[in-house]
Amino acid sequence: MESLPLIATAVGLVVSISTTVLGGTKWMIVRMEERTERRFVESERRTDERFLRTEKLIDDRFAQVDNRFAQVDNRFEQMDKKFEQMDKKFEQMHKKFEQVDQRFAQVDEQLRSVVTSVTELKISVARLEGPHPPFLIARS
């Protein structure tokens, strides 16, 4: 029985040390859980921010591309209008060339009639003048 207080003290000491170790372990585990939870929350927040930034960049890029397509469409419309104007001008030029061709045909007819008239005049003058002596090839 003399050893009973000693055993009780030893058991109390073991229980006390075990309680201290288990309490410290529990405290460390709770602290690790809190830190891990904070890190997960922070990581999730950063990931969400990255996704939002990326989504915004993609949306901005698509907006720029849409803008560029609108500009290209406008330019094509302008080109179509200019091609229509060119077609009209070519039609006008074609009409003018046809008019010029007709005028050239008229002038050609007039020139042929003048040449014919001049030829007839030469023949008439030659008849009035009478016969001419043959050309002399060599005069000595």
Image (tube, rainbow, N blue to C red):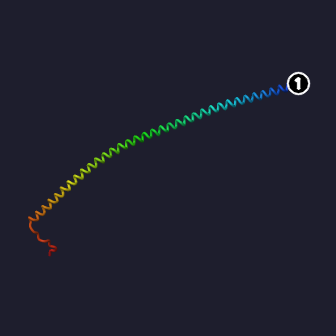
Residue 45 image offset from top left, x and y in percent: 60, 32
- The amino acid type of the residue labelled 1 equals Leu
Q: Quadrant of the C terminus?
A: bottom left
Q: Quadrant of the N terminus?
A: top right
Q: In the rendered view, does 60 fall on the left or right side of 100?
A: right
Quarter-of-image position of residue 26: top right
Q: Is residue 79 above or below residue 4?
A: below
Residue 53 image offset from top left, x and y in percent: 54, 35
Q: In the rendered view, does 67 fall on the left or right side of 12?
A: left
Residue drawn 53% across the image and 36% down it: 55
Q: In the rendered view, does 5 fall on the left or right side of 43?
A: right
Q: Is residue 5 above or below residue 84?
A: above
What secondary structure is found at the residue carrying circle 1?
helix
Determine the residue located farthest toward the right in the rendered image.
2
Q: In the rendered view, does 18 fall on the left or right side of 131?
A: right
Residue 101 image offset from top left, x and y in percent: 24, 53
Quarter-of-image position of residue 44: top right
Q: Is residue 84 above or below residue 51?
A: below
Residue drawn 22% across the image and 52% down it: 102
Q: Mark 1 — residue?
A: 4
Residue 43 image offset from top left, x and y in percent: 62, 34
Number of labels in the image equals 1
Instruction: Answer few, some or many: residues within 10 Å of disc 1's Cα (few below 14, many 20 plus, some between 14 and 19).
Output: few
Residue drawn 79% across the image and 28% down it: 18
Residue drawn 57% across the image and 34% down it: 49
